[in-house]
């Protein structure tokens, strides 16, 4: 029996045991049961199932999406020829600009029975190229199942208190719920959850967490870093906290190490996007990110479009195997990641990523034409001045804006010292313009924050 089966909450009146769930929840429970089998399938068997599903969705899209039908024709392909890695690689990648230009012709005019209703989702535009896609009820079901899979992998105690600080919480007073909310509360009894808007002042966030004393915390990496600063400066602690979960931004090794040193607990990260849902989950045994192969096929490609070897960094290209409303097949999502090893010590055969590096716009454009991931020397900033938050924005090939939140504006000497650290770290004598903010640096509409942004096209 599955280790989590005894935790199920019976929702049929009069039946306490064995647990029975209503018909609307049955597909979710069925997926969780299947996951325990599919995540340990032989690699060849897993891939065969993926391509069988891919051909099915491609044939549907070829019939009902004008854009995808034309895309296949331009590549000289039929849907059936996408039945293996070689055939799929012959289809040019789909860019965000392609999606923008396709408009309504991108979407499928019809859905198979049981896939409706559809919903429209928009990205936050953190790549600078916002897109709008349609997703089906099957896509949402899969995302809910992946969310619970992540909880089960890390054996979280659902009866604990959960604190959430993120963007989709209405600003103002904190929200308190009697359970963790969907999808957990749909099938498991759970403890209370407490929600706070990401726009709340960091000091107020820390005080709120002190009051709740949660067992689990969910937030963004940059917000977590600010909380660590606040807690350290004011000698605050969260004695009940067992684990921190991060989403929405790139989680750095430095933040992981700070949490381990300061709080003595782990950070568990999840990689997802609005367009395709859950992409990869951090393994509780190895720390690698396992790709959610039951719903997506993920490629990591070098600049020539070839698959990256383990340890190499490349573009993340995603094929959604279950979206029959919007054919996202070989979609260049705009992220970069490092391909993971072929051997998985945990026994799960789902392919892996070592880590997610960031988005294309997080790469510095050097005046000599090269692009690379910038080091910004952040670990030396606070040796110069009490800097609470920073962001570097490359405005031109030779000019960088330095945005800072400080206890007080830097003196000319401090600006000079900080500027020296920044240009040494970036590897070029950029012109630096300092810009000061009083409370916090602005985030994107989706609540995300990036420490380095390149605006040079």
Image: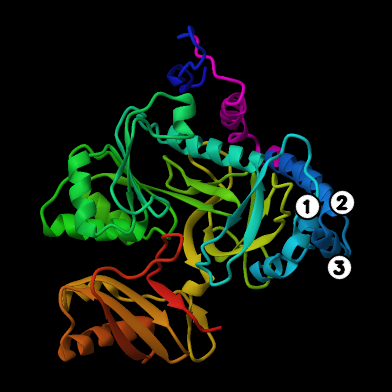
Ranked by sequence position, the earlier of labels 3 and 1 is 3
Ranked by sequence position, the earlier of labels 2 and 1 is 2
Q: Which residue lies at the image location 50% right of the left edge and 14% below the top edge?
A: 19
Q: Which residue lies at the image location 82% right of the left edge and 64% below the top edge?
A: 71
Label 2, label 3: how far apart the Cα atoms are: 15 Å
Camera-nearest label, 3 or 1:
1
Quadrant of the frame with the C terminus: bottom right
Disc number for residue 63: 2
What residue would you read off at disc 3? 74
Disc number for residue 108: 1
Range of magenta residues: 18-45
Q: Which residue lies at the image location 75% right of the left edge and 54% below the top edge?
A: 85
Label 2, label 1: how far apart the Cα atoms are: 8 Å
Ranked by sequence position, the earlier of labels 2 and 3 is 2
10 Å crowding of disc 3: few (<14), some (14-19), many (20+): few
Q: Secondary structure at mark 1?
A: loop
* 446 with respect to 80 (left or right): left
Front residue of 404/13: it is 13
10 Å crowding of disc 1: few (<14), some (14-19), many (20+): many
């Amino acid at each position: 029996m599955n280790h989590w089966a005894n935790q199920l909450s019976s929702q049929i009146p009069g039946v306490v045991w064995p647990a029975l769930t209503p018909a609307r929840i049955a597909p979710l429970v069925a997926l969780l049961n299947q996951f325990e089998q599919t995540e340990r399938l032989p690699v060849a068997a897993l891939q065969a199932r993926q391509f069988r599903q891919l051909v099915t969705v491609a044939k549907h899209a070829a019939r009902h999406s004008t854009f995808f039908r034309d895309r296949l024709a331009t590549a000289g392909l039929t849907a059936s020829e996408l039945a293996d890695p070689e055939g799929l690689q012959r289809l040019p990648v789909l860019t965000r600009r392609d999606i923008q230009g396709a408009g309504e012709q991108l979407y499928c005019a019809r859905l198979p029975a049981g896939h409706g209703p559809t919903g429209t989702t928009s990205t936050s535009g953190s790549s600078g190229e916002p897109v709008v896609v349609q997703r089906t009820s099957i896509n949402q079901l899969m995302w809910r199942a992946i969310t619970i899979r992540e909880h089960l992998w890390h054996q979280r105690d659902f009866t604990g208190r959960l604190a959430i600080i993120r963007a989709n919480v209405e600003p103002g007073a904190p929200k308190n719920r009697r359970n963790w909310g969907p999808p957990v509360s749909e099938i498991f009894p759970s403890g209370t959850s407490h929600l706070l808007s990401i726009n709340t002042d960091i000091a107020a966030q820390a005080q709120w967490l002190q009051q709740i004393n949660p067992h689990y915390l969910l937030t963004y990496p940059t917000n977590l870093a600010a909380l660590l600063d606040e807690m350290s400066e004011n000698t605050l602690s969260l004695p009940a906290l067992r684990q921190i979960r991060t989403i929405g931004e790139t989680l750095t090794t430095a933040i992981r190490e700070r949490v381990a040193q300061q709080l003595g607990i782990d950070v568990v990260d999840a990689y997802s996007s609005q367009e395709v849902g859950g992409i990869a989950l951090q393994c509780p045994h190895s720390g690698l990110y396992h790709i959610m192969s039951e719903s997506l096929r993920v490629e990591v490609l070098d600049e020539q479009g070839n698959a990256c070897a383990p340890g190499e960094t490349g573009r993340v290209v995603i094929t959604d195997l279950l979206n029959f409303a919007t054919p996202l097949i070989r979609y260049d999502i705009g992220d970069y990641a490092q391909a993971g090893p072929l051997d998985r010590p945990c026994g799960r055969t789902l392919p892996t990523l070592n880590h997610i590096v960031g988005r294309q716009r997080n790469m510095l454009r050097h005046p000599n034409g090269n692009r690379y991931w910038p080091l910004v020397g952040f670990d030396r900033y606070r040796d110069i001045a009490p800097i609470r938050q920073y962001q570097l924005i490359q405005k031109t090939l030779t000019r960088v804006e330095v945005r800072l939140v400080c206890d007080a504006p830097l003196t000319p000497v401090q600006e000079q010292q900080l500027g020296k650290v920044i240009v040494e770290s970036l590897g070029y004598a950029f012109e630096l313009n300092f810009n000061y903010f009083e409370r916090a640096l602005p985030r994107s509409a989706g609540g995300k924050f990036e420490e380095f942004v390149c605006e040079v096209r």
